[in-house]
Amino acid sequence: MTVRSGAGHVLRLQRGERPWQSGGGGLESGTGWVNDGGNLPGGSIFTTVLEDKTEGSLWLPHAAGAREVVLHFAQGRVARIEAASGAEELEALFDAHSGEPRRVSHVGVGLNPALSRPTGWTLVDQHIRGAFFVALGEYRYMGGQNASSLNIDFCNPKATVEIDGRALVVEGQIAV
């Protein structure tokens, strides 16, 4: 999987045989569990990734108070943070948590046709049709291996996402 964002930033992720999952926002029959982790409104597809295989850089308009953020990844985790403002606060957020809070846990694409513009609240914005999102930290609940006291999502509504060389999303627009 390849994600292109900002001015020339490219992030490469591998999911191996891990399946894509859907997050429709409904309750799964008899479990009481919302199938996309409890995020409403729902409407997304997502997958976990191989813990040590994410490489490259990802541009985000904002991330936990930081603006114009570039996360640089090496061996599956955030190795360096650049930002127009707030980089120190984002570093402090990661440093305040145990386990591997800088490791990618899952990624996805929003599919909700009723959402058309960002609200500034990531748990809503990640479901905008065509928005790319990346989660960092804990995800054993999704079948991954990473343990952390942090699980946080960041969203880029204008990224390009390619799967096996085929464009799924082009600059925030569904292409398939």
Image (tube, grey):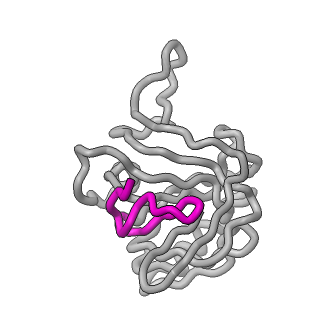
The residue lying toward the viewer, choosing from 129 and 143, is: 129
Residue 65 visible to an observer of this rendering = no
Residue 101, x across and y down, in percent = 66, 60
The residue lying toward the viewer, choosing from 29 and 154, is: 29
Q: For residue 41, which quarter of the picture?
A: top left
Q: Quadrant of the N terminus?
A: bottom right
Relative vertical location of residue 169 with respect to residue 56 in this rendering, above or below: above
The segment highlighted magenta reads 157-176
Q: For residue 80, which quarter of the picture?
A: bottom right
Residue in the image at 44% along x and 53% along y: 109
The residue lying toward the viewer, choosing from 107 and 166, is: 166
Relative vertical location of residue 118 with respect to residue 5 in this rendering, above or below: above
Residue 170 visible to an observer of this rendering = yes
Residue in the image at 54% along x and 72% along y: 90
Residue in the image at 49% along x and 15% along y: 29
User: How many badges with numbers are in the image?
Assistant: 0
Residue 78, x across and y down, in percent = 65, 72
Is residue 162 in the magenta section? yes
Residue 141, x across and y down, in percent = 66, 38
Q: For residue 12, which quarter of the picture?
A: bottom right
The answer to whether 64 appears left or right of 21 in the picture is left
Residue 6, x across and y down, in percent = 42, 80
Is residue 77 in the magenta section? no
Residue at the outermost top position: 30
Residue in the image at 63% along x and 77% along y: 56
The residue lying toward the viewer, choosing from 77 and 15, is: 15
